[in-house]
Amino acid sequence: MRSLRQVAAGLPLAALYAIAVWVPLQYLPTRQFELLPRPAVWLDEALLVVLAGFATAAAVRWPVRVRLPVALPLAGFVVIALASSVYNRTSLVELVLGLRAPLQCVVLAFVVVALDVPEKHLARLAAITVALAVLQAPFAVQQLAATHDLVSRDEVVGTMWRGASNSMAYFLVIVMLPLAGYWLRRPRPRWPLAALAAMMIPLVFSSSRGTYYLAPVAIVVAFWGQLRHNHRLHLLLAGTALLAAALFAVYYGVKPTSPGSEVDAELSPQRIIREQLDPKGAMGRLYYLRYAAELLVRRGGAAVLLGVGPARFSSTSGAYLGAPLLAEATRGAHAPVIPSQLIATLAEFGLLGLAALGLAFMAGVWILYRAAAVLTEPGWRGWAEGAVGAGAFVLFAAPLDNVWELQHVAYYFWGMVGAAAVTLRRSSA
């Protein structure tokens, strides 16, 4: 029989695997099928608390492990959040939830680094994530077939909740880019190509227009050094374009015409910009950005720097708590939420908070970039190159959604940062 010491040693790894599996699947048993009570979605948070305890003990013993460049901007963000809370007299609940949303997933990077997760387990966690992304395909096909006569474009959500089609697409992109990078450096075996092709199905059927525009930019960022001379990349891009065209033909062949498409095509830049200015007929993100800026200016210079307070506007915590300022801003609008990390962080933490949190995410991307430049093992190097594009996507998508707070985006981004930091440390040892 295994000793208690052996069992305890295996608990952190078991918790990591459980989080990796639970995060993208948690809405199946709690929302889609209602097999479990909704509070079950907090399982990953509970596991992360356990992991944080193990990581803290390891960091006390080996403090050099957790010296990451993201630590300083994160510490600055916490100080700014505390100052914002004091200045705006927010409650302790608002402060805790307002900090939890953007910082919870960052803990995962420190956990991976502090626990020095072995390479074989990092590879297995990556393989599990790929499998979960592929799993979105059969759900997407079934959901499109069941909702093909509806005008709404937000019915294909995979294993996510209803209306989360954009969120599913973001998850797919940050999985596909590292996988593509891995295959480009290690073209044998061929299974990554099959996995990428399967993931294209839910990506196209999600009708996530922001993803369609940002994904090519992220691809250029990830593989800029290979665009001119790597013939495998050329073939991969050509095959992706052909498959996407076929899937788009299927999608638009079965979905009814959306309102306004008789004037502008659904992917028309003019139409998309116009929708961002209209909070009643669409999400109106540009409108709300101006609204938030005017709100801060009216409240004075301190509010411009520190915001209106944690969980007081459009963060996921603000929406969860029913923030009065959010309700006032969206009264009579298309939706009771404002899907934009840029707006949420700016409004709640001001320019200083936005700068500090943005620098933390850029520091995470820098770790991925260093791994792509330094690692020599082809598979890990290719993975890191694709992860750089995934990190850029997470940065670029901040105006479109609360991506820094979405668990199935932020967990995997910070997990990749932690894996890159561990691999870099071992390569230099």
Image (spheres, rainbow, N blue to C red):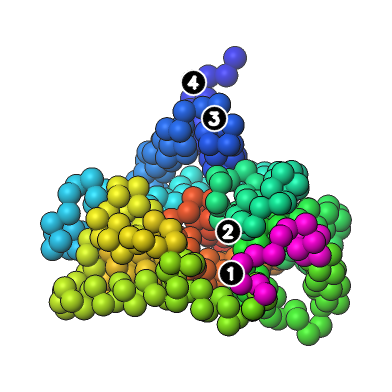
- Kind of residue at disc 3: Glu
Q: Is residue 399 magenta?
A: no
- Kind of residue at disc 4: Leu
Q: In which quarter of the image is residue 220?
A: bottom right
Query: Which of pointers 4 and 1 indicates the residue nearer the eye?
Result: 1
User: Which residue was labeled with disc 3?
Assistant: 34
Image coordinates of residue 155 in percent, x first then y, are 63, 51
Please give the range of residues in magenta.
247-262
- How much space separates mark 4 and mark 3, taking CA atoms? 36 Å
Q: Which mark is residue 4?
A: 4
Q: Which of marks 4 and 3 is nearer the N terminus?
A: 4
Q: Earlier in the sequence, mark 2 or mark 1?
A: 2
User: Which residue was labeled with disc 2?
Assistant: 166
Image coordinates of residue 123 in percent, x first then y, are 67, 49
Q: Which mark is residue 210?
A: 1
- Kind of residue at disc 1: Gly
Quadrant that contains the N terminus? top right
Label 1: which secondary element: helix
